[in-house]
Image: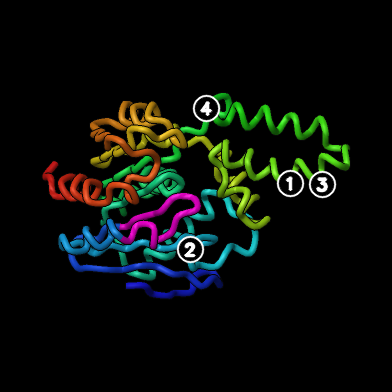
Amino acid sequence: MNKKIKIQGLDINYIEKGQGKALVILHGWGGSSKSWENVINLLSNNKYRVICPDLPGFGESDSPKKSWNINEYIRFVLEFLKILEVEDFVLLGHSFGGGLSTKITADYPRLVQKLILCDAAVVRAKERLNLRQKVAKSCSFMTKIFANNEFYKNNVQKKLRPLIYKIAGTNDYYKANETMKETFKKVFAEDLRAYLTYIKKPTLVVWGEKDITTPIEDAYTIKNIIDGAELTIIKEVAHSPHIKKPEELAKIITEFINRKI
């Protein structure tokens, strides 16, 4: 069920459902606890206490009063869990939440029992652009060439800019307010691969086969760096297996949590 709490002066919405072993879910950029509702219902019925906050700036939670970086989001998560008296939990992070989960597990291993990284935004190499992002970058370059042309600015650019963000897979950035746009830049500027080497907890890497937001090669990179990590690929889905195949994802998560390692 949805609950409310105030943290750092912000009104925070979260879902807490079920009883048993604690499972904390950190959603991706542009997501919320609601986007995980189907998976939460399935997991809570399997006797887990599932907790999923709307991170600041998303869902029904307030936006930060200023732009945040990864460490500020992590401080928020730690404070949130302390207030709820949650420790020794299974941590599941999707996309942006996967990046947060990676750093939390590396820096605060005593808190995390097992780690699940779902299409996690961990590899953020500046030199790597997928085809869509290369096309978007070319379009963006063209907008700069004609930036001083009044007809272009008033007619073409207004229609082209949202299309560029959509092509690049960063439509969430275009829709965000100015504070969250600055937050987006800070968050996605940090490559997190170095933290993977410090993770010694049982780890499941689960990925959508057709993900182009965080390409499937990232899944293999993460699995190869974390000692003993398992990898499961979900067929015929892209970046959001929790939305497209919640039953299959919940089954994979349940089997991993229940497995004695």
- Tell me which amino acid carries mark 2: Gly
Residue underneath mark 3: 154
Is residue 107 in view?
Answer: no
Q: Mark 1 to mark 2: distance in Å?
A: 27 Å
SS label for mark 2: loop
Residue underneath mark 4: 130
Q: Earlier in the sequence, mark 1 or mark 4?
A: 4
Q: Mark 4 to mark 3: distance in Å?
A: 30 Å
Q: Position of residue 104 (x, y in %)?
A: 40, 48
Q: Is 226 placed above or below 20 here?
A: above
Magenta stretch, residue numbers: 24-37
Q: Earlier in the sequence, mark 3 or mark 2?
A: 2
Q: What residue is drawn where x is 19% and y is 68%?
A: 19
SS label for mark 4: loop
- Tell me which amino acid carries mark 3: Asn
Q: Position of residue 88 (x, y in %)?
A: 26, 56
Q: Earlier in the sequence, mark 2 or mark 4?
A: 2
Q: Are marks 3 and 1 in contact (CB under 8 Å)?
A: yes
Q: Mark 2 to mark 4: distance in Å?
A: 28 Å
Residue underneath mark 2: 59
Residue 212 part of the magenta segment: no
SS label for mark 3: helix
Q: Position of residue 209 (x, y in %)?
A: 33, 33
Q: Mark 3 to mark 1: distance in Å?
A: 7 Å
User: Looking at the rendered structure, which numbered label has been put on residue 158?
Assistant: 1
- Tell me which amino acid carries mark 4: Asn
Q: What residue is drawn where x is 54% and y is 55%?
A: 72
Image quadrant assignment for residue 210: top left
Q: Earlier in the sequence, mark 1 or mark 2?
A: 2
Is residue 54 in view?
Answer: yes
- Tell me which amino acid carries mark 1: Lys
